[in-house]
Structures are given as C-alpha cells and as structure tokens.
Amino acid sequence: MGKIKKILIANRGEIAVRIIRAIREMELSPVVVYSDADELSLAVKLSDEAYHIGESQSSKSYLVMDKIIDVAKKSNADAIHPGYGFLAENAEFAKRVEAEGIIFIGPSPEAIINMGSKTLSRDIMKKAGIPVVPGMVDAITDMKDLEKTAEEIGYPVLLKASAGGGGKGMRRVNKKEDLEKSFKLSSSEALSSFGDAAVYVEKFIEEPHHIEIQVLADKYGNTVHLGERECSVQRRYQKIIEETPSPFINDDIRDKMGAIAIQAAKAVNYSNAGTVEFIVDKNFNFYFLEMNTRLQVEHPITEMVTGIDLVKEQILIAEGHKLSFTQEDIKPRGSSIECRIYAEDPFNNFAPSPGRIIEYVPPAGGIGVRDDSGVYEGFEVPVHYDPLISKLVTWGRDRTEAINRMKRALFEYRIAGINTSIPYFLQILENEEFLSGNYTTNLIERIESKKVELSEENELVALFASGIREMNGKMSECSGTNSGENGKSWKLHGRMKNLRRF
Ligand code: ADP
C-alpha cells in the first residue's frame, strides 16, 4: 500500500471542512471537488486544489463517479475520502476507486455490500449470533407471510425498506387491518427513495433508545470500540442531538454492547471506522439495527471524550497502518453533546431556509466548545443539499457541565440571513425528561405535544432568534429568497438588545 500524500474529498459542506482539517494536521494535501452552488464554499477556500465537477444537483456532480475519479487522476490524489452521504456507502464506487489504484478511505466493497442492505445484514448478524430485532430476515414477497410473521412477533410492528436510510419507507402498524395498506405505502416510498421496493417487517420496540457503538478496525483484524453515543433525541426518526456517554446504560451493558459491536464488525471482516447501531428496550435488551460503513455525522462527540481523531485514524488505517492503541488504552473522559444546526425554520414546520448568511459569529470560544461548520458570513446556503450547516459540540467533566456549556454556546451563536434550528434546541435542553437522562426516542413527540416553558435566559435567546427570523423574512421579501412571515412583533427588539454583546 502506497504512502498517502494527497487526498481528494468526495463531499461538501461541514464534513469536507472537517476532513480537510485532519489532512492538514497530518501535513498532507487536501483536494476538493465542487458543484456550481459550492464554488465559494468554505471547503473550496480551505483546500489546496479545487475542481469544478458540474451542476448543483448532486446527480450531476457529487454523485457522478466518473467525474470524481477523473479529478483524482488529474490531481494525482493517492486516496479518496467519501465523507458521509453521497457515494460514501456505494460499493461500486469503492470498487472503481480501488481498480484505478487509488486508496478508498473506508471499508472493503464486500463489507459495504454486506452491511448495505438491512435484510442481508440481519441475516449475517443472526448467523454470527448477534441479537437482531425479532422479525423477518428476507424481504416480503407474500401478504400471507407478512401477516403470519406480524402475528408471531405481535403488534405493533414496523415495516422497513431493505435499502433503507433516513427513516424513509418506515411505517408503524398497530393492527392487522392496516397491514396491507401500510405495506403498499412503504413499498412505494422505498421504490421512489432507493429504487428498490423491498420491504421487511420487524417488531416495533416501544419507548426505545437508539444507542450506537463507534468501531475502529485495521486491516489486520485488530478491532476496538470507542464507546457509545446516545442518539435518542430524534425527530421523525432523524437524530438531532447526540451525547456520550449514554446516561441510560451502565458499565456492564456498555461493555456487552461494545463486545457485540466488535463481533459484528469482525463478522464482515470490517476495516476502517464504522458504527454499529442498536435499539435498546427499557429492560436493557439490545438488538442490532444496522451498521453504517462510514464516518458518522455525530463522530465529534466520541472524539471529544476519547481524544482520538477519527478521520486521522481512517487515513492511517487506509494507508495500511496497524491501530496504535488497544481496547485498554481507550479511556473516555467526561461527557460530550452535539446539536445539529440546520438551515431550517423550527417555527414553520422545519421548512428549509436556504439563502445568504449576512451575519455569522459562531461561539467557538471558551473551554470545551467545538463548532464544526461548513459556512461563513456572506456564504449562500444552497437549496440543493442536506440543510446541515454546522455541528455545535461541547465537552464537560460531567453531563451537566456539557449541557450547560451547550446552552451557553447556543446563547452566543449569532447567525442571521437564514433561519436555524438553534431556538428549538433550547426547549430540549431544558426539558425535564431530557435532563433526567432517561429519555427515549419518543421525547420529541412529547415535547412537541405540549407548550414548553423556557427559562428567562433561554426565552430571550428564542425571542432573539424569532426576531432574527422576522428580520430574515423582511429581508427576503426584498431579495425574494425566503418567504417572509408576519405576526411576531418588532417590540421584541427591546429585549433582544440585552443579547447584543458586540
Ligand atoms: P434508517 O436507516 O432509515 O435511519 P434505522 O434502522 O437506523 O433506519 O432506524 C432509525 C430510527 O427508527 C431508530 O433510531 C429508531 O428511532 C427507529 N426504529 C428503528 N427500528 C425500530 C424498531 N424496531 N422499533 C422502534 N423504533 C425503531
């Protein structure tokens, strides 16, 4: 395996910036590709070389393998880092990259295939003695089979797309009468989202926790885990806040989950960084959900408590190095939490809020705060991609310190021109159930079903945000990018002045 000197990043946004940082610190050279919409992106500005690969639509740029491989060859890149999303879990891409003699920074194409389908991976895991959620192993081909399995495992059940991701095609079914209709809906959603109509059924676990284990494996079979991430703060099956350690599990369960995650990775000869996701019931029974064969959005919280840079480890592993530490060397310290800052409007059903950022002061100052951002003041957030613009991460000696630090950082975060999810987080961070640590994936549903009282300080932040939002509305009325909304009063500005520190 050759020495890596130059790495092409086949991605955009915050994760491209994150990867550039690791590459620079290793004294290597980052190359980026960009679409029309990303010509002025932060990643382009921070790279050594940047190549235009097409129109803004990802199917004409970031998803076109030929274009990316061409740039890798043209720029003499030794390796490609795919980030997450786009081509990161595309086995054909990994195969083609390697066929060109370029190192793919990720697992083997075989491991991607084996873990890429929920049904296939369930089958492999079951055979390896790993607990999976009770249900079918193969996709549904016959209504009778589906009815029989649903009866056996007991209602409620969950229909899921085999090729699933992002909660698409997932449907809870409470009774037999709804089964056929739900199956048809899931199947057509699966077809339109993934080009594959295959759906299977598993037991719906009530009030579950989503807890995942970070794994690192080199090419010589050395596999370690870096502890867990609690990802139960979800909206429509999508994570929005993650924390580590999980306040729900104890050391005994943690060790067991870690050992099973390693076993799962070994069952597919996994190498590089990967994440084994589990669903955990109230009695601490845990079941394999899926393995993500790539870097996870929420990886920074693991880095904060372990001190290990996961992207650097990915590069070293891909270059053929052995892991430089053992399981015993990994001693997580303190607590870390991440809020995913989206360009969307929490006051308007989370509608996307693209547009120009006219003021941007991230709160990356002070002890224990990390802002993994892909934007800057003046940047125009494109409509074409995932609206994640930044990940705000804090570390504390314990959970309370990490949470309070997050509240402080959110309080300082200044962003205008677009709407963001910042005010929404404050409701969660002050919620009693969240603060108790014993919350499940139903938390957000419960929060949204009742009006939440915020503390005075956070009420101010929320007011401030809604003032900015109103201002954004007024501005976009002029520029025609955002839809303005009336109603909220400018008298808030009087109170907002309290927050103007600059
Ligand atoms: P996707 O790949 O579409 O994101 P996952 O299998 O990772 O789907 O599940 C996403 C989320 O859906 C989980 O974090 C959890 O909240 C919920 N979920 C998945 N399977 C179950 C289940 N069997 N019972 C209850 N909730 C589930």
Image: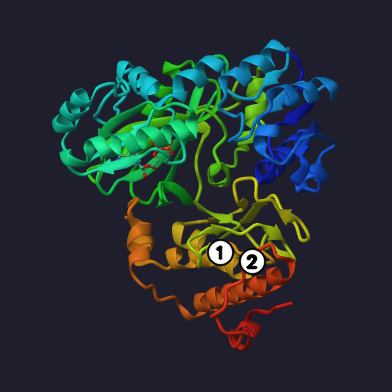
* Residue 258 falls left or right of residue 396: left
Dot 2 lies on which element? Answer: loop
Callout 1 amino acid: Ile
Mark 1, other Cα within 10 Å: few <14 / some 14–19 / many ≥20: many
**Residue 212 drawn above or below residue 350:** above
Residue at 33% from the left image edge and 52% from the top image edge: 440
Residue 46, percent across and down?
Answer: 81, 44
Q: Disc 1 vs disc 2: Cβ atoms closer than 8 Å?
A: yes
Q: Tell me the quarter of the image containing the N terminus.
A: top right
Residue at 59% from the left image edge and 46% from the top image edge: 386
Residue 279, percent across and down?
Answer: 33, 39
If the picture is divided into quarters, which one holds ligand 1? top left
Pick the residue in front: 119 or 309: 119
Looking at the rendered structure, which numbered label has been put on residue 422? 1
Callout 2 amino acid: Tyr
Mark 2, other Cα within 10 Å: few <14 / some 14–19 / many ≥20: some
